[in-house]
Image (tube, rainbow, N blue to C red):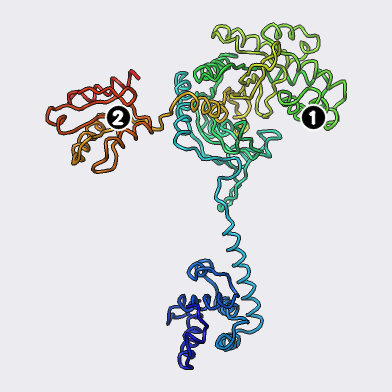
Amino acid sequence: MRGSFTSLFSDTISLNFLLRNLVTSIFSFSGLSLSVPFAPILSRLILRCTACGTVGREAPALAMQRLGPLSREAWATLTLQLLRPPCTGASLLFRRVLGGLLQPPAREFAEARLKIQLESDKEKSNFVIKTPKGTRDLNPQQMAIREKILNAVIRCFKCHGAKGLDTPVFELKEVLTEKYGENSRLIYDLKDQGGELLALRYDLTVPFARYLAMNKIKKMKRYHIGKVWRRESPSINQGRYREFCQCDFDIAGRFDPMIPDAECLKIIYEILNTLQLGNFLIKVNDRRILDGMFAVCGVPENKLRFVCSSVDKLGKMSWKDVREEMVGKMGLASEVADCIGDYIQQHGGVSLVEQLLQDPKLSQNKLALEGLRDLKLLFEYLTLFGITEKIIFDLSLARGLDYYTGVIYEAVLLQAPARQGEELLGVGSVAAGGRYDDLVGMFDPKGHKVPCVGLSIGVERIFSIVEQRMEAIEKIQMTETQVLVATAQKNFLKERMKLIAELWDAGIKAEMLYKKDPSFLSQLHYCEETGIPLVAVIGERELKDGVIKLRSVASREEVDIKRENIVTEIQRRTRES
């Protein structure tokens, strides 16, 4: 095959036959009737040109596959390129035949098209398979951990009477814009062929408000578990992704002040306690107190949003850096920034609320006064719920989202200080929320408001913490399988299938290996690998005596159970474990 072209077809008749059929094949391949197979002939040409050193030593079939569908001119041009010098003899004759078929403009156009396609194929060959930036796959072990977390969260939501709700993962872009302040730039836009301007949802709160307004619902307590998307710089180590899951709980409707708000804080407390994440603190503040504080300090109206965003960075930046941003970048007067600093660096409990109620400046501002009075009432309810030891009034908490109108809160995990005597350090927010009384009214044609308050659990950061802990201290069961149906003997597939059908019909989560005669050792190894706690063994003796041998994988203890009692026994053991 790798000999010279003329050695393959030494006589003139054979050469003419090849040329005639090859030309016919080239045109047939681009749409006309195909009289001879084209691939074998072009393969020979590629092999010939390999010998001439004009193309890479690739398999002909692979070369054909990469080329894909080409136009008639491109195929002709390709063949001309394959037969270019230093090949001689038959190659030169064939170049003249094909060269006469293509006019110079057509040849130039075909060569350009061929070059573009070959460059495209080269780019495809460099393609690296990976997940998009800021996203990840979850393997079965990780999914098992995540499901445990989500189940604990959902149980708590349901304990407080919430109903489940789901909304589309994308919304009309107009629904999402102007709701998140400067974070609106992080929204993912979509192009819709139907002409609608769409965007991936940024959170679950705005879609919930849209749902209430669209369906004219005035009162609802709901939970929603779903993914959201934000176009920000991801930080995998800190559990921050571009695609992540949120768990939301919200109470919509007109109720007496601070009662729903106190319940939301109680829910955060319960969830963090249940998940045993370690020491935590829930910071609370009120947007009305912030707005009143900005007003008495002299912040101009057109800079309120930007100043609020800067204050929200205080947990991540020092006050010196925040002040420099206010004065240097925003043009705020130094005395105004210093006035803000005097307030936002304070934190405490109900005593700080009472102190600020006597503040000569804040007590004269209507908004701040309303916020402080509601906050004092909130602390009274939190005392009744028994959770005030985890609550702190922090004037630096701002929550940068535009739709908050009242109480705001954020839960942070704490770590021990590096030196004795230092304060506990915050290592990241794991839950947050607040009151948003005006958001639903933005979607209502008549502007009817439905007051709302809610919370969101940050699953990704919690997941990272729980995953590290569970991997270190225990083997994770990746399935909920309660028992493996097994045998130690051959020709017992039918009996295993009968037994497992009985267990399935009784609601028992059971598996068996998909082999006719698996070894007993391989069946036990499967249980150990996947975390299945029990093995139901059936064999000749068990079949004769009407029993099933139930084996504990952990203790290796075996006991015979009457077949009619096997379901009850498995259920009892599962409950006890």
Residue 165 appears at what percent x and percent y?
48, 31
CA distance for labels 1 and 2: 64 Å
User: Quarter-wise, where is residue 400 in the image?
Assistant: top right
From the viewer's perspective, is 169 left or right of 406?
left
Query: Image quadrant for the C terminus?
Result: top left
Q: How crowded is mark 2: few (under 14 residues within 10 Å), some or many (20 or more)?
A: many
Which residue occupies 22% across, 32% down? 502
Q: Residues within 10 Å of mark 1 (few under 14, many from 20)?
A: some
Residue 170 position (above or below residue 102):
above
From the viewer's perspective, is 426 left or right of 161?
right
Q: Which of 80 and 225 is in front in this view?
A: 80
Which residue occupies 24% across, 32% down? 505
Residue 197 appears at what percent x and percent y?
61, 47
Residues under numbered marks 1 and 2 in contact, where contact means CB atoms less than 8 Å apart: no
Q: Which of 106 and 98 is in front in this view?
A: 98
Q: Is mark 2 on a helix, strand or loop?
A: strand
Residue 536 appears at what percent x and percent y?
25, 29
The residue where tag 2 is placed is 483
> Which is nearer the N-term, disc 1 or disc 2?
1
The residue where tag 1 is placed is 303
Q: Which of 90 and 187 is in front in this view?
A: 90
Q: Nearer the viewer, residue 238 or 356?
A: 238
From the viewer's perspective, is 319 left or right of 60?
right
User: Quarter-wise, where is residue 358 in the image?
Assistant: top right
Res. 197 visible in picture: yes
Kind of residue at disc 2: Val
